[in-house]
Image: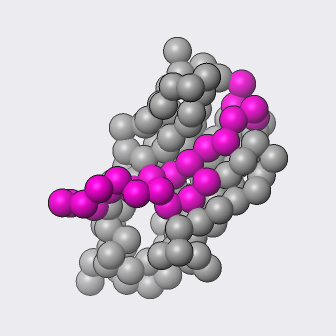
Amino acid sequence: QVQLVESGGGSVQPGGSLRLSCAASGIIFSRYPMDWYRQAPGKQRELVASISSGGSANYADSVKGRFTISRDNAKNTVYLQMNSLKPEDTAVYYCHALVLYRDYWGRGTQATVSS
């Protein structure tokens, strides 16, 4: 059974940083691309960052230069380092994997950016 468990959310002031983690189990982690999505109140879920099995990363324009996605295949974990946070980054952040044509999601972790 595939499980994704996020951690690392919290509350920070504008300009601050958070590091999100997503621990995966039930899959051969190194074989699969991994994604981070977010959903703000009243808005649709949006793709924030993706990382391929080989480590190539892509980002939404809104977070380029501020967020960094990375993975540690030995720990079955994907990370999202979020710097220079803005109030508009406030959202629930979800880890996602597409495994054998099925979508798997974590339960999410809340990140709040407010002064």
Q: Position of residue 80 (x, y in %)?
A: 57, 58
Which image quarter: residue 42?
bottom left
Q: Residue furthest front?
A: 101
x 32%, y 67%: residue: 90
Horizontal side of 58 relative to 35 (left or right) equals right
Horizontal side of 103 relative to 78 (left or right) equals left
Q: Quadrant of the C terminus?
A: bottom left
Q: Residue furthest right?
A: 54
x 48%, y 31%: residue: 103
Horizontal side of 104 relative to 33 (left or right) equals left
Structure colour scheme:
one colour
Which image quarter: residue 40?
bottom left
- Looking at the image, can residue 50 be seen? yes
Q: Which residues are magenta?
A: 28-50
Q: Residue furthest left?
A: 42
Identify which residue, 64 or 82, lies in the foreground: 64
Q: Position of residue 45 (x, y in %)?
A: 34, 53
